[in-house]
Image (cartoon, rainbow, N blue to C red):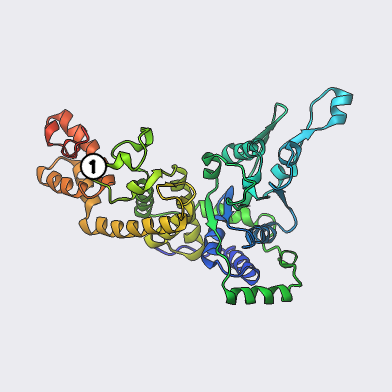
Amino acid sequence: MGMVSVSSKRPLVERLREELSKRFIGNEEVISILLLNLLHRKSTTLIRAPRGTGKSTLMLLVLKGLFGDEFVVISGASEVKRGEVVGRLHIPSLEKKGREKVLWAKFVRAQGKGIDEVNRLNPYTTANIHHLMQFGEVWAYGQKYTVEDYTLIANENPGDVTTFIQPPPFYDRFDIALYLSSLTVSQKFALQELNNDYGYDLIKSMPRVMEPGDLAEIRREVEETGVEPGLIGFINTLVRDFQVCVRGKEHSSVPLPVLCEGCHFTRFVCSRVKEPPSERATLILLQLVKAKKWLEGKVEEKDVIEMAKWVLIHRTGFLNPEKPLKEISELLERERERMFERESRKQWFILNELYNGFSPGLYRTAKEIAAEDNVFAEELFSLEEKWVREGRISREETLKVGLGLE
């Protein structure tokens, strides 16, 4: 991809990275994707980790670096009331004028929002925050408050015993989910030196890197950054690989692996994905690609696969959910190999030629390819339906019949 012009705001992002790195030890890959995710509008990040791994520290460092002291954090560990999250009635207005005036909570008004221990929020509070993230608004006493651009960072330890089971659609509203690893021995020594340097108050020492308006300007520039059609196609195909099921998994009550028995495509990603990711995965990956191109000047397909780990891990229901990081890493390595095979076989060129016009020779080649690629097969099924209606092929000749799907 070609280089893009250098923005005057890019040094601010690099300075934020430097200040974070001075105060947060380890998890460098996590820091990089977190920074990219901050660069698009209404950015939401979920940090998942066991106790004592620094998830609250990372959340606070980022919010302080962006907003100084002008951010609001609510805690699921305390009894969060509606007035703290959404708003409360202004009693004097009600008593004197009989008018219901809502005092909107600082949490909804602040551009910087944090949620500590999101897994311990009660269901009512979760519902209000979910609505804010989904529709960009909150309601109280029949009145609506529209939420402008914001940055929301939440953390949780899903293994806590005092945990509510939050609904999957709520987690889907988080752009990325980051998993922190505990520190090695050498990293522990480095952290102790940091604490000595900063007087055991890393958060207080964190400077505000951006002035009001800087982040808005960065996000505007990122939104206007162009992405090559080929890379957009790569994103669409990658996510579709995690969604596709030639046996209609999305609308079937038959569980995996029973649904996969006898299927031709059992060696592909679909056989290890119980619940496919939503289309938001595609949208967020595109935003991250724009952010990386804006920040670093270029993006490659391998970068998309690396970023996809943090976009897909919390949106995908794995057949083996015990080790999500290991599972998503293995599946994405398969994807890397699969994308190379697709390029080598020039299969999208072949498909495009068939969309332009039926060719018996190309159709035979396409059927051979489709027998090894369920996303390609899905596209070929659609063409076959058209050709059957036009009388170019018979129903019995189709790949769908050949695979026993009709």
Residue positioned most to the right: 96
Coordinates of residue 11 in the picture (x, y in percent): 59, 67
The N terminus lies in which quarter of the figure? Answer: bottom left
Q: Residues within 10 Å of mark 1 (few under 14, many from 20)?
A: few
273 vs 360, left or right, is right
What residue is pinned by disc 1?
262
Q: Is residue 297 left or right of residue 346?
A: right
Can residue 325 be seen from the camera position used here? yes
Percent x, y of residue 235? 38, 51
Looking at the image, is 21 positioned above or below residue 236? below
Query: 26 or 220: which is nearer to us?
Result: 26
User: Of all residues shown, which one is farthest toward the front?
Assistant: 161
Instruction: Give residue 176's position: percent from left, percent from top.
Output: 52, 52
Rendered view: 278 above or below 229: above
Q: Is residue 114 above or below residue 252?
A: below
Residue at 66 percent of width and 54 percent of height: 213
Residue furthest to the left: 361
At a point 16% along the width and 45% down the height, the residue shown is 367
- From the viewer's perspective, tell me whether residue 98 is left or right of residue 370: right
Q: Amino acid at mark 1?
A: Gly
Check the picture and name the quadrant holding the C terminus. Answer: top left
Is residue 150 in sight in this rendering? no
Name the residue located 17 percent from the left edge and 33 percent from the top edge.
Answer: 387
| Vertical order, 341 against 205 (above or below) | above
x and y, in percent, of residue 139 in the image:
68, 32
**Count of numbered tags:** 1
Instruction: Check disc 1 and report its element: helix, strand or loop.
Output: loop
Quadrant of res 103 = top right
